[in-house]
Amino acid sequence: MSDSTEQETPVIAVPAARSATRGQGRAVSAAARLGLEIRRQRMIRGLTQAEVASLIGLSARSNLSDYELGRRLPPRDLVIAIENGLSLHSGELSQWHARALVERADRWFEDSLGADS
């Protein structure tokens, strides 16, 4: 029997580490992950797409939306501007951008090999 003066330590749920998969275990492309991370960082700071677009010198918020949704891959200089504008110093966005470029090149290469068959 336990002493009634003892208090139970509360259990704190820790979320599982994020992976680069989504849904039914499908892999998320690096371009999509880059977009998700841009959006996450923007939301953490409580900024709208229009505010971030203005902060980094984009003329249209729709461009940022396309990047966040993984529809388009932003140019490298824009990724750096986003990192600087949001005070991100880890280089994580640049790393996802580099991975996305490799994926795009690999897809092109595979498609080119398939066209020769």
Image (cartoon, rainbow, N blue to C red):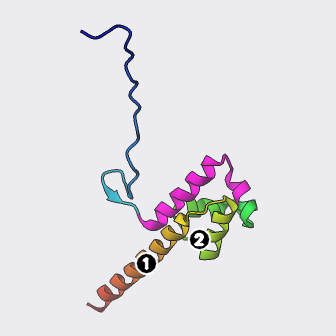
Local packing at callout 2 (Cα closer than 10 Å; few below 14, some 14-19, many 20+) is some
Residue lying farthest to the bottom in this orientation: 116
**Res 74 label:** 2
Numbered range of the magenta stretch: 29-52
Local packing at callout 1 (Cα closer than 10 Å; few below 14, some 14-19, many 20+) is few
Q: Are marks 2 and 1 in contact (CB under 8 Å)?
A: no
Residue at the image position 40 percent from the left and 61 percent from the top: 28
Residue 111 as seen in the image, left or right of residue 78? left
Q: Does residue 111 lie above or below 19 as drawn?
A: below
Image coordinates for residue 87, horizontal then vertical, percent: 66, 59
Residue at the image position 47 percent from the left and 62 percent from the top: 32
Report which quarter residue 39 is drawn in: bottom right
Residue at the image position 61 percent from the left and 47 percent from the top: 44
Q: Secondary structure at mark 2?
A: loop
For the N terminus, give its image quadrant: top left
For the C terminus, give its image quadrant: bottom left
**What is the CA distance from the residue labelled 2 to the residue labelled 1?**
14 Å
Please tell me whether the stretch drawn in magenta is mainly helix, strand or loop.
Answer: helix
Would you say residue 40 sits in the magenta stretch?
yes
- Which kind of residue does numbered mark 2 sit on? Pro
Query: Considering depth in this image, is 11 or 108 the residue closer to the camera?
Result: 11
Query: Considering depth in this image, is 33 or 116 the residue closer to the camera?
Result: 33
Image coordinates for residue 101, horizontal then vertical, percent: 47, 77
Question: Which residue has dot 1 on it?
Answer: 102
Image coordinates for residue 54, horizontal then vertical, percent: 75, 61
- Which kind of residue does numbered mark 1 sit on? Val
Image coordinates for residue 43, horizontal then vertical, percent: 61, 48
Residue at the image position 35 percent from the left and 87 percent from the top: 112
Q: Does residue 34 lie above or below 16 as drawn?
A: below
Would you say residue 107 sits in the magenta stretch?
no
Lower sequence index among marks 2 and 1? 2
